[in-house]
Amino acid sequence: MPDQYDRTLREIFPDQHPGGFSQLEDGRWVWTTFNSFQWDLNYSNPWVFRAMAGEMMFLANLGVDILRMDAVAFIWKQMGTDCENLPQAHALIRAFNAVMRIAAPAVFFKSEAIVHPDQVVQYIGQDECQIGYNPLQMALLWNTLATREVNLLHQALSYRHNLPDHTAWVNYVRSHDDIGWTFADEDASQFGIHGYDHRQFLNRFFVNHFDGSFARGVPFQYNPNTGDCRVSGTAAALAGLAQHDPHAVDRIKLLYSIALSTGGLPLIYLGDEVGTLNDDDWSSDSNKSDDSRWAHRPRYNAELYEQRHDASTAAGQIYQGLRHMIDIRQNNPRLNGGRLVTFNTNNKHIIGYIRNNALLAFGNFSEHAQTISAHTLQAMPARAKDLISGETVALNQDLVLRPYQVMWLEIA
């Protein structure tokens, strides 16, 4: 039976166990999509559904407000399919949601679906998961740092960002998991980018196997049969802080500025706010050496947190920069809600978008100063206050952004 299913399954963690099953000592097989210690549940058994619904209500009674629906795309099995994103998976989430609307209506579901962008959004809705991780934006932030070109990010913000009312993205820069390059090949092809080849470039760039790379990531789950690979590493390590790159701090602040200003719920991965680097000892620990994600799961670094108020340190510059942007977000209604409209800067290195017809955001993804022409800005007011710097800038002339500079401009 496992062999029949395996013919059509995608290997998720090929380094740890090929295929989708693990064999117990007594000879029986267990479905383990991800890890041998993570058993998949058989939701075709109504008693399993009932038991899991009971667990959800138990957590709600403890005061839990949001339940993460982990790997939601993989929860239903059907022989002859890849067992991903099946219609029954959506029906199952809707059924759980209906139970919770009756028993604990304040509880929200958060989807975690690292699949094709078309499929990610299908799990987000009032009758399924009210909020969901935004893996496409996360991956494209790092892609844009590597390429210095905003084409794919601008495209995603234009056509894949806005969600139905009463739902929201969870926008993040890093998490406890690896980075998978989840952009759609058909999206990339619109810019003449070959998806497979581009993913190979990104993997090489972020594990420092590409000349000129500033990143110090670690490969995760390389599959020699398909060439598939993902990347591990903290935001600081991937942004160049490990080798004291002079632009590393600004790169980190740039990425988090987008997570904070594109709407939805911003997530900060613990340690990013002080520039925590990779744990280089993960591979020498027998309990961790088979999983490179431990590189970005280091222990609490008390020294870095002690530096967070010292602006002469990288930790202090990152922390105070993020704190400043959070304060702006909390106190400025121009950043409310989750919808945006992209703004074409006519500069391939600068992303632009408008929030609530009142705030114009720019981010320079280049290590060189970049210009937005006065002609591009001609529909904007003559002057606008930049909430980041506190300065008033002229928009009736060419606008120059420093390397990796962020601007949040009040235009109404």
Image (cartoon, rainbow, N blue to C red):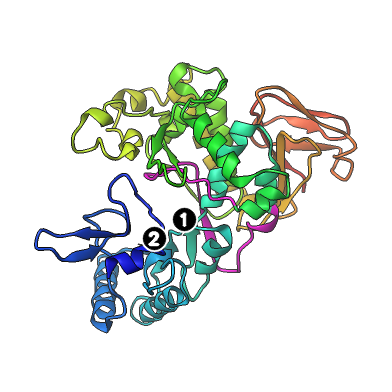
- Number of the label disc, if any, that sits on residue 71: 2
Placement of 59 over or under 239, stated as above or below: below
Element assignment for label 2? loop
Q: Quadrant of the N terminus?
A: bottom left
- The residue most toward the left is 26
- Name the residue type under label 1: Ile
Separation of residues labelled 2 and 1 (CA atoms): 7 Å
Q: Residue at x 53, y 71 (%)?
A: 125
Query: Does the magenta-highlighted stretch encompass residue 42?
Result: no
Closer-to-camera residue (168/82): 82
In the rendered structure, the answer to whether residue 97 lies left or right of residue 141 reads: left
Query: Does the magenta-highlighted stretch encompass residue 178?
Result: yes
Query: Dominant secondary structure of the magenta stretch?
Result: loop
Q: Residue at x 38, y 29 (%)?
A: 276
In the rendered structure, the answer to whether residue 217 lies left or right of residue 359 reads: left
**Where's residue 260, x and y in %?**
56, 45
Residue designated by label 1:
114
The picture quadrant where one finds residue 339 is bottom right
**Where's residue 235, x and y in %?**
46, 34
- Name the residue type under label 2: Ala
Element assignment for label 1? loop
Can residue 233 be seen here? The reply is no
Is the Cβ of the residue at disc 2 closer than 8 Å to that at disc 1?
yes
Can residue 356 be seen here? The reply is yes
- Number of the label disc, if any, that sits on residue 334: none
Q: Residue at x 27, y 31 (%)?
A: 282
- Which numbered disc flags the more N-terminal residue, 2 or 1? 2
**Where's residue 375, x and y in %?**
90, 37
For label 2, the crowd category at 10 Å Cα-Cα, with few meaning under 14, some 14 to 19 and many 20 or more, is some
The picture quadrant where one finds residue 349 is top right
**Where's residue 315, x and y in %?**
43, 25
Residues in magenta?
A: 158-183
